[in-house]
Image (cartoon, helix red, strand yellow):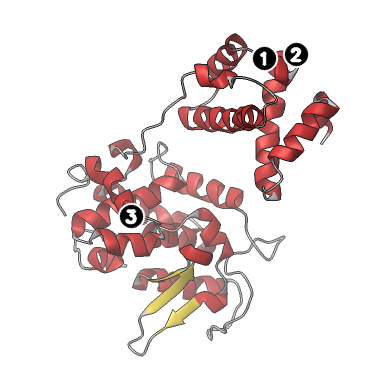
Amino acid sequence: MDEIKILTNEELGLYDEFSLSFNPKTKKDYLLKIIQFKKFLEGKDLLDVNKEDCQKFMCSIRETYAKSTSEKIYSYIHSFYSFLQRNKHIEINPFSFVEKPIVSRDKGKDDVLSIQEINKLIDSLYKLNARDRLIMVFLTTTGCMLNELVDVKWKDLIVDEDNNYYVRLGKGKKERVVKLHPYCFKLIEDYRYHSGLSEIILPTDDFIFTTQKSNSITDRNVRVIVHKAFSLAGLENYSAKDLRHSYAAISLLLGADKEEIQKQLGWSDKYYAIRYKNVIDFVDSESIDYMMQKDNMNINKK
């Protein structure tokens, strides 16, 4: 990384000490934020900054980035300077004088599709190929995160004696088994057919979702697919994360309790459900079993 040369040997040494326990990805993320701040300082040493430098930097960040990104940048650099203060490299953390950008974690109606909008999305999926159609229904009916979707393998599919289908999602503490909507499994069968795979699903280590050039798919690939699907449905204001928000809000509204949603979505705390209290009335007074029972959801007619 050529940009690292902007840091002095002393600054780089302090950063290495600060990030000693970080995993490689986290270490790189923090470093990029600190390099960004260093560039803004135009040659000034990181140990010599004052509150005015920090305030001007955060002002430029707020003007350039969304609140969530601004909050992240602030938190990363504030954490670095807290480390410097604790270890007596500086007397005061200059970022402690700067107001932290705060992003509300409560979900509003702009984060959640209504049942009518979900119907509109589902009804437009015929315009997509078999893989992309499956991806959209998988995200809509499981509430999984993108990184969980791209990691799903054929061995993660499960069937019980009553021919109910399930999928294992997540890793570590977030690993869970969730029920698949019948239409989702139908699309899995369609996808296998169009991919030239056999009808019999063997529990292999192969990823379910692939591309023409790779035996796997990336988060970015999925975001492009989701954007295309929303555009075709005339719902350009939504993004991939809103499918997860919608699953949570609608399931709560249809009668699922907080513990059920916590298990389904892999939340660490059932009180995450409180974030969705503002959208319950918006989503129409109407966990996948709850959705499957509703006649006004077009996916149940597929």
Q: Residue at x 72, y 60 (%)?
A: 213
* Position in image of residue 112 (x %, y %): 32, 44
Residue, disc 2: 44
Q: Nearer the viewer, mark 2 or mark 3?
A: 2
172 sits to left or right of 245? right
Mark 2 or mark 1: which comes first in sequence? 2
Residue, disc 3: 247
* Position in image of residue 277 (x %, y %): 23, 44
Mark number for residue 78?
A: none
Asked which secondary structure carries label 1, the reply is loop
71 sits to left or right of 197? left
Q: CA distance from mark 2 to mark 1?
A: 7 Å
Q: Residue at x 82, y 27 (%)?
A: 10
Does residue 193 show up?
no
Q: CA distance from mark 1 to mark 3?
A: 45 Å
Asked which secondary structure carries label 2, the reply is loop
Q: Is residue 73 above or below residue 53?
A: below
Which residue is at the front of the view, 88 or 16?
88
Q: Is residue 199 above or below residue 141?
A: below
Mark number for residue 49?
A: 1
Q: Amino acid at mark 2?
A: Lys
Mark 1 or mark 3: which comes first in sequence? 1
Q: Could you tell me if the residues under marks 2 and 3 are in contact, i.e. CB atoms within 8 Å?
A: no
Q: Amino acid at mark 3?
A: Tyr
Does residue 251 show up?
yes
Q: How many C-alpha atoms fall within 10 Å of the one at disc 2: few (<14), some, or many (≥20)?
A: few
Which residue is at the front of the view, 75 or 292?
75
Asked which secondary structure carries label 3, the reply is helix
Q: Nearer the viewer, mark 1 or mark 3?
A: 1
* Position in image of residue 14 (x %, y %): 75, 33
